[in-house]
Amino acid sequence: MLELLRKLVESISSNMPVAYCRLVETRGSTPQKAGAAMLVYADGSQFGTLGGGCVEADVKRRAISALAMNQALCCSFQLDSDYGWGDGLICGGRMRVVVQPANNAAAAAYFRQLCNVANRKQGHTEAIHFSTGEGSVPPAFALFDNRNQLVATLHFDSEVVAQLGSHLKSLSERPRPYAHGAIAFLPTLPICRLVIVGGGHVGQAVAKLASELEFEVWVTDDRAEFVSAERFPTAERCLVGELESTLSQIPIDAHTYCLIVTRGHQHDEEALFHLIDRHAAYVGMIGSRRKIRLIFDDLLEKGVSPSLLDRVHAPVGIDIGSLTVPEIAVSICAELVSHRNRSGIVPGRPDKVTV
């Protein structure tokens, strides 16, 4: 989403006509869920997707028309015989999409604010009014920051905006999109930092996939050649240094995920020792059950609390029978996403080594 918003502001700055298309409500089975977004340009090109198929093509057609008239609109789609035969979407679901041209002054100002707030990576919520009758009421937008403070509005009546706050949910609960009447509330959740300790093959593969899954990736290793920008082009930070000094400098909080995938037993143990009491959202460590047991026993002898060790996810990764490095990365990232999106619930993972 952040990449899409940055692309939107770039287009506005370049005076390139562009429409912001947002999926605000779904019912039943649909190819995408509320919150999906797409940019449509006057030449018919696009950035992002609303799920493809006939619905997306129809949204593009309407967005091009909206750009020509500089007029926002709401669209409703029923995924039945009108839209499904050619694409296999005969599922009875419903989608509502708002289309807002972004190049008039008011819209441009709103979307610049939206991108600025998104760039902070602390989360925000958009409240979008959509028409329940096809095209009868133009959409309106209100932007709230991570503390649910109003930042900007577009087309919203001030009296309606004053009532929105009572329906906002705390982003700390990581809510999914929801609606109240004809107003959709679309939370963008805080970006979680993923600290990968170890720049080897597994760390590299996890970093690439985790970046696409909207984690902010930091990588650290004591070997400079293993944490180069060339090896980790999508990482926010690449840190070189001894584990004790490097890990102590990395900010870790309740939104931070830590993954230990170093090159050996001693480095894994050292990394875990320096991370285990930092109050991270998640600490995971790769390795065999025997290796993990040995590390846990050593840390217990050093005075580490059993309750802290019980919070460590080890061995890490959902059991998908992974053998190759890419498969291992998929299993690890699936666990990270489930833990993030489901309040710590991770189905399909092996039993943790307990103390």
Image: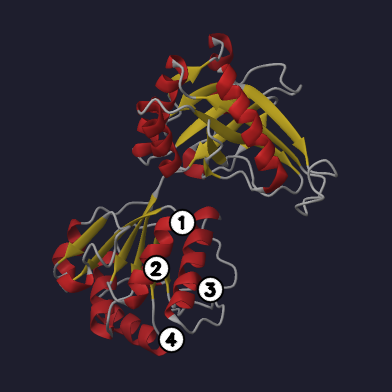
Bin the neighbour count of mark 1 within 10 Å (Cα to Cα): few under 14, some 14-19, many 20 and up: few
Q: Nearer the viewer, mark 3 or mark 1?
A: 1
Q: Residue 151's image quarter?
A: top left
Q: CA distance from mark 1 to mark 2?
A: 10 Å
Residue corresponding to mark 4? 289
Q: Earlier in the sequence, mark 3 or mark 2?
A: 2
* Residues under numbered marks 1 and 4 in contact, where contact means CB atoms less than 8 Å apart: no
Residue 343 horizontal side relative to residue 23, left or right? left
Residue 58: image x %, image y %? 69, 36
Give how far across and how far down residue 197 sits, in percent: 28, 69
Q: Quadrant of the C terminus?
A: bottom left
* CA distance separating discs 3 and 2: 14 Å
Judging by the rendered image, the residue that carries numbered circle 1 is 213
Task: Please give the residue where the numbered disc 3 appears in the rendered image.
Answer: 318
Residue 258 versus residue 105: which sits nearer the camera? 105
Tally of numbered tags: 4
User: Viewer-proximal residue, 67 or 88?
Assistant: 67
Three-letter code for the amino acid on which mark 2 is drawn: Val
Separation of residues labelled 4 and 3 (CA atoms): 14 Å
Q: Position of residue 4 (x, y in %)?
A: 45, 41
According to the picture, the residue beneath numbered tag 2 turns out to be 206
